Amino acid sequence: MLDAITNRSLATDPLRTTAPPAVGAGFAAAFRSVVAGHGEPAAGRTSEPERKTATEDADRTRLDEAVAAFKKELSLTPAQRVRRDVLKSMNVTEAAIEALPPKERVEIEQKVAMEVARRMKIMQGGSATPATMASLLG
């Protein structure tokens, strides 16, 4: 199946595999892992059917991981995606926000909310002026 996507032939080296993407790496990383083809050859000698089965199993695992990451991405609302992107641009994680003292947490959450609202307004085709920001935040 990967041959059709990547136009690569497994005949060149059917034992090559790649490491699965890190947990939380997202759809893009999982998809690149699947499309990247195969990495280092497996140690030891195996018969042709065993190699095909091992390669097919590895391909199936990578494909399953990519599909799971894609489904997770699809399950997010646009606002959740924007919030994730805002936190990433601020180099902050949800866990780090939860670990902050209440006063600092409120400040960070307000900054994040304002930036999310600004980006959502822009995505909807409007401009993000101070007046529209105030109306978005209630």
Image: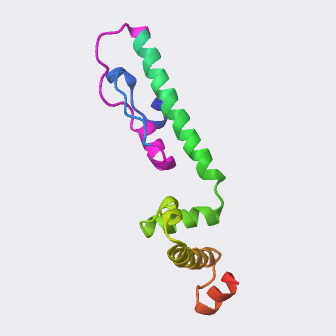
Nearest the camera: 18 or 133?
133
Tell me, yes or no, if residue 128 can be seen here: yes
Q: Position of residue 61 (x, y in %)?
A: 50, 29
Q: Name the quadrant of the C terminus.
A: bottom right
Q: Position of residue 31 (x, y in %)?
A: 48, 43
Residue 97 magenta-highlighted:
no
Residue 99 in the figure: left or right of residue 113:
left
Q: In this view, does 48 lie above or below 123?
A: above
Residue drawn at point x = 53 percent, y = 79 percent: 107
Q: In this view, does 30 lie above or below 60?
A: below
Q: Position of residue 48 (x, y in %)?
A: 39, 9
Nearest the camera: 86 or 121?
86
The total number of labels drawn is 0
Q: In the rendered image, which quarter is residue 42 located in? A: top left
Residue 33 magenta-highlighted:
yes
Q: Which colour scheme is used?
A: rainbow
Q: Is residue 29 above or below residue 63?
A: below
In the picture as drawn, the residue positioned furthest to the top comes out as 47
Residue drawn at point x = 41 percent, y = 66 percent: 91
In the picture as drawn, the residue positioned furthest to the front comes out as 101
Q: Where is residue 127 in the image (x, y as percent from the top left)?
A: 59, 85
Residue 47 in the figure: left or right of residue 125:
left
Q: Which span of residues is magenta-colored?
A: 23-49
Residue drawn at point x = 55 percent, y = 34 percent: 64
Residue drawn at point x = 63 percent, y = 66 percent: 79
Tell me, yes or no, if residue 1 can be seen here: no
Nearest the camera: 98 or 76?
98
